[in-house]
Image (cartoon, rainbow, N blue to C red):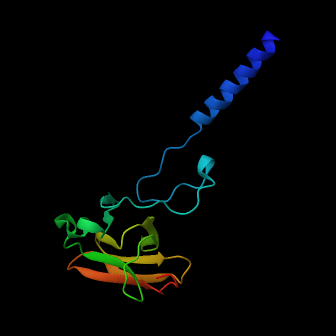
Amino acid sequence: MMVSRFLACTALAMTFAGTAFAQEAPPPPGTAAPMSGNNAMASGPMSAPMDQVISDGGVQTVCTGVGSAKDNPQFQGWPAQIEFSNEGTQYLSGVHIVLSQNGHVLRDTVCNGPWFLVKGDGMYQVKGSFQGMRDKTQSFSASGAHKRVVLQFAKAPNQ
């Protein structure tokens, strides 16, 4: 009886230890979760952190535009301000964004604010998806003078 309890406890301990060691590191902020291992069931991209600049690959981005953050001097004068709205010109949040350059995806995230700011050299493409509506895509330069890039979606029945 003692041997079987010992074996059962050992097996249980090894199961928990195996699970703890098999966990993967989280992805960098503003990128999609990996679709393998323990995260194979993850669905969709992660949300971009609000009002935090993400810099990598020579491009800077930030999801913002809510409350006092929209007046933050740090976010004034960025070269590209992507805005999300509906046909009633109401701001939208929760837009899935794929930002790419020369066919290479740089960001795949959800912005929970109405603005997604971009700073970097060259031309970029942004694709926005919102609540199953037709995707919106635009190309723009993220350097030089400030420009607004508006992704306007249909007005949902509840808006």
Residue 79 in the figure: left or right of residue 34: left
Quadrant of residue 54 within the rendered picture: bottom left
User: Which residue shows up at 77% across the image and 16% down it?
Assistant: 5
In the image, residue 21 above or below residue 29: above
State left or right for residue 3 relative to residue 31: right
Residue nearer the viewer, 92 or 141:
92
Screen quadrant of the N terminus: top right
Q: Nearer the viewer, residue 106 or 41?
A: 41
Kindly identify the residue that appears in the image at 63 percent across and 53 percent down: 40
Q: Position of residue 110 (x, y in %)?
A: 45, 66
Q: Which residue reaches farthest front?
A: 158
Q: Is residue 106 visible?
A: no
Q: Residue at x 61, y 29 (%)?
A: 17
Q: Please indicate whether residue 47 sits to the left or right of residue 65 in the image.
A: right
Q: Is residue 24 visible?
A: yes
149 is higher (above) or lower (below) than 49: below
Question: Could you say which is closer to the camera, residue 75 or residue 103?
Answer: 75
In the image as oriented, which residue stretches furthest toward the right? 1
Report the number of numbered marks: 0
- Relative to 1, say whether 141 is above or below: below
Task: State the image coordinates of residue 113 (x, y, percent, origin top left).
Answer: 36, 69
Q: Nearer the viewer, residue 159 or 117?
A: 159
Give the image quarter of residue 124: bottom left
- Residue 52: image quadrant is bottom left
| Residue furthest bottom as drawn | 87
Query: Where does the image place residue 11, in percent across and percent down from the top left?
Result: 72, 24
Outermost residue toward the top in this view: 2
Q: Position of residue 150 (x, y in %)?
A: 36, 83
- Residue displayed at 29% across by 82% down: 148
